[in-house]
Amino acid sequence: MLLLSKLADYAIIIASYSAREPQQTYTAAEIALAVNIALPTVQKILKRLNQAGLLQSERGPHGGYRLAKRPDEISVAQIIAALDGPIGLTECSLAEDHCQKAKGCNIRSNLSLINQALKIALEAVTLADMIKPTPREVSISLDSLRAHVR
Amino acid sequence: MLLLSKLADYAIIIASYSAREPQQTYTAAEIALAVNIALPTVQKILKRLNQAGLLQSERGPHGGYRLAKRPDEISVAQIIAALDGPIGLTECSLAEDHCQKAKGCNIRSNLSLINQALKIALEAVTLADMIKPTPREVSISLDSLRAHVR
DNA sequence: ATTATTCAGGACTAAAATAGTCCTAAAAAG
DNA sequence: CTTTTTAGGACTATTTTAGTCCTGAATAAT
């Protein structure tokens, strides 16, 4: 069971790449070369990140993409959402109208808590965290997570 | 972005259903009727749960399926794994040989922590929890989660 | 024994999601 | 006005996933 689509996975790599030089503008081609992903795919991903407001773009010569915000203001959750849509454990954690299959299904409240926890965890990790060579303090995210759920 | 496949989702419903009468043996047909899922699909799921050792089966008249362990000994994580395979955020969280795309990729340690946290959370929730009408103490899982990650 | 019931195993099909590519247009710079 | 580069979206191919079906084996009852 894989959580992220390939595209979202790539997107995290790409965003992390440009987070290392947040001022710098990179063309799609440069990024494709740097992260070793096919150019058309990179282009697609950059467009989506741009539409989601996570990147800024500029056309023409010397154009390209750069982060629209500071690395610590862009969460992994935002990147995933831009590529894969909203995060949910099951269909029914997204739907407003609760689960059609009414039988056997007021069961899932525990799962929805896990879902929430996951969301919060992904929101807590930012690009700034991603480019740190060795991670240490995801405990921060877990604290906030506890706070939310308890 | 959906975390669980439909099949895994169904599996949780089905397992929860038989967790309410753990001694009772149910035929595939009975369960299909009760949870309102197509019989062949239910059969497929029951077989996989059985193969995974979560259910016991008996053939012949009066045959059927029942839980192989107590409800509090069967975690949601086990059910998901039986249907969707091992839980992982990305390809590279499963692979032993770390990420081929070496460029830009010693980046993911934070994600793998989230992955771990998710796993632990799913392991902490059992069928016994699932059949409680109102959930309260996922905080337990989060504590153990904190313990593991910190 | 024979028959009815039920699971076991796995092949197969169909549908949907995903990944990946490509084309045309628009903006910017020189 | 030509080159560079993104914008938008259509399109195709691939892979996954869901769902169905068939044949065989175990069990129980008559």
Image (cartoon, coloured by chain):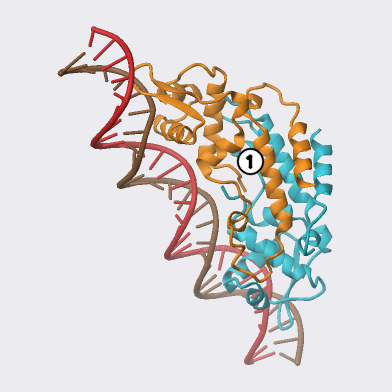
Chain colours: A cyan, B orange, C brown, D red
Q: Within 10 Å of the Cα at label 1, are there few (<14), some (14-19), or many (20+) other Cα atoms? A: many
- Position of residue A22 relative to residue A95, above or below, is below
Q: Is residue B68 left or right of residue A32?
A: left
Residue B81 x/y as whole percent: 55, 41
Could you tell me the amino acid type at mark 1?
Answer: Leu
Q: Is residue A87 left or right of residue C28?
A: left
The foreground one among A15 and B111 is B111
Residue B16 x/y as whole percent: 57, 26
Q: Residue at x 58, y 23 (%)?
A: B70
Q: Residue at x 51, y 16 (%)?
A: B23
Quarter of the rendering containing residue A14:
bottom right
Q: Chain of mark 1?
A: A
The foreground one among B105 and A112 is B105
Q: Which residue is mark 1?
A: A89
- Position of residue B37 relative to residue A135, above or below, is above
The foreground one among B34 and B81 is B81
Q: Is residue A35 left or right of residue A133?
A: left
Residue B122 x/y as whole percent: 65, 38
- Position of residue B16 relative to residue A113, above or below, is above
Residue B64 x/y as whole percent: 41, 22
For mark 1, give the secondary structure. loop
Quarter of the rendering containing residue A10:
bottom right
The foreground one among B114 and A95 is B114
- For the question of whether residue A41 can be seen, the reply is yes
